[in-house]
Image (spheres, rainbow, N blue to C red):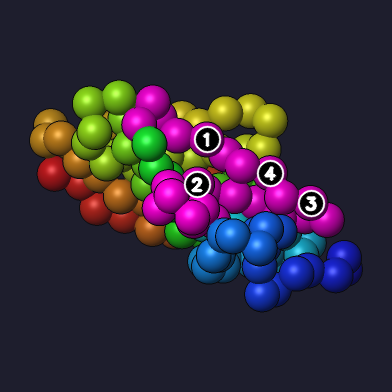
Amino acid sequence: MPAINSVTLGAHHNESSIAAGINARGQAAGTIEDDAGHRRAVVYDRRRVELGTLGGSDSYASGINAAGTVVGTAQNADGHWRAFVARPGAGMRDLGTLGGRGSHGAAINDAGHVAGLAD
């Protein structure tokens, strides 16, 4: 298993970080916050890979499965929080809502099923 920078997730000296999940391959998913207060969902696997947003300013990672698929929550262009799934290099996919404005992705299993909440 690769060594993981468990303290920083690859954060630089002016950033803070939190790890939200780790899989058996040693990939960690979490969130980096820069000194301006912007947060980005990241995967750390020998290096940090930022996952982006859904058009808004912030995103958070909540979990990662064995395949390296990450689940979390990101702001869309309208400023609403939406659940997402993402793989490094493949972009984020908005999981939608139950008719409301917001949703949150909390966990993902190895079959790719997501648990969370939605308006």
Mark number displayed over residue 40: 2
Identity of the residue drawn at 69% across and 73% down: 6
Choose between 45 and 112: the one closer to the eye: 45
Residue 51 picture location, percent across and down? 57, 39
Mark yes or no: residue 110 visible.
no
Quarter-wise, where is residue 29 in the image?
Answer: bottom right
Q: Which residue is mark 4?
A: 49
Residues at discs 3 and 4 in contact (Cβ within 8 Å): yes
As helix, strand or loop, the secondary structure at mark 1 comes to strand
Label 1 is placed on what type of residue? Gly
Residue 45 lies within the magenta run = yes
- Residue at mark 3 to residue at mark 2: CA–CA distance: 15 Å
Mark number displayed over residue 52: 1
Label 4 is placed on what type of residue? Val
In the image as oriented, which residue stretches furthest toward the bottom? 7
Sequence-first tag of 2 and 4: 2
- Residue at mark 1 to residue at mark 2: CA–CA distance: 6 Å
- Residue at mark 3 to residue at mark 1: CA–CA distance: 16 Å
Disc 4 residue crowd, few under 14, some 14–19, many 20+, Cα 10 Å: some
Residue 52 lies within the magenta run = yes
| Range of magenta residues | 32-56
Residue 42 picture location, percent across and down? 59, 50
Residues at discs 1 and 4 in contact (Cβ within 8 Å): no
Identity of the residue drawn at 30% across and 24% down: 77
Mark number displayed over residue 47: 3
Residues at discs 1 and 2 in contact (Cβ within 8 Å): yes
